[in-house]
Amino acid sequence: MMLKITGNALPPSITGHPIEDRATPQTSERCKSAIGARASATVRLRPQWVWHRLSDPCNWPQFLEHLTDITKSDFDMDEYTWSVLGLTCKMRLTVREPPLHLAWQSGSDPQMQLSGEIILEPLDWYTHLTVQLNYVTADPHLTALLQTLELQLQRDVTRMAQVLERGLCEPS
């Protein structure tokens, strides 16, 4: 899904938590592209086990193809540096509600703002996993790269479910 927006609007999150626009004045003057994607899968594991693997963003590059690296800050347990589509940006966990909800948002990078969340819904012994990603950029090159985000995210979430299930035993 792609929207052309101007001003300070960001796509809403799944849960309705506000997502603030931290754009610098020069980028909020230009036309921005807002690209959002949502994908879901059912994981044949309990939410606590899925949370155990997904609550650490450093594990995400093995599931999400457009992320090349995530490193945790030495000083702040909720701050990370992400490498996304050739850009490096600071991300901050904004919601941490074990074992069901994790959300994040980027800092004030003028090239691209990011936000997203992971929602885990219990289904008896299974978990319904939903990942929502939102990107806002004024850079036409980044907009072109993000055009396939929805299709890529569905493949990534399917792979995420398979990796979580494959050969892994639930902790007791």
Image (cartoon, helix red, strand yellow):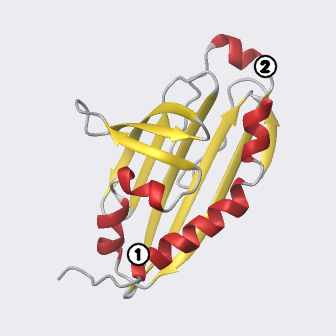
| Residue tagged 1 | 164
Going 74% across and 23% down the picture, which residue do you hit?
7
Q: Amino acid at mark 2?
A: Arg
Tell me if I can see residue 75 in this picture: yes
Q: Is residue 69 left or right of residue 26?
A: left
Q: Is residue 38 above or below residue 16?
A: below
Residue furthest toward the top? 26
Which numbered disc, 2 or 1, marks the residue that appears first in the sequence? 2
Tell me if I can see residue 128 in this picture: no
Which of the 4 image quarters holds residue 134? top right
| Residue tagged 2 | 30
The residue lying toward the viewer, choosing from 39 and 58, is 58
Going 51% across and 47% down the picture, which residue do you hit?
68
The C terminus: image quadrant: bottom left
Determine whether the residue tagged by mark 2 lies in a helix, strand or loop: loop
Question: Residue 96 location, x and y as percent?
Answer: 34, 51
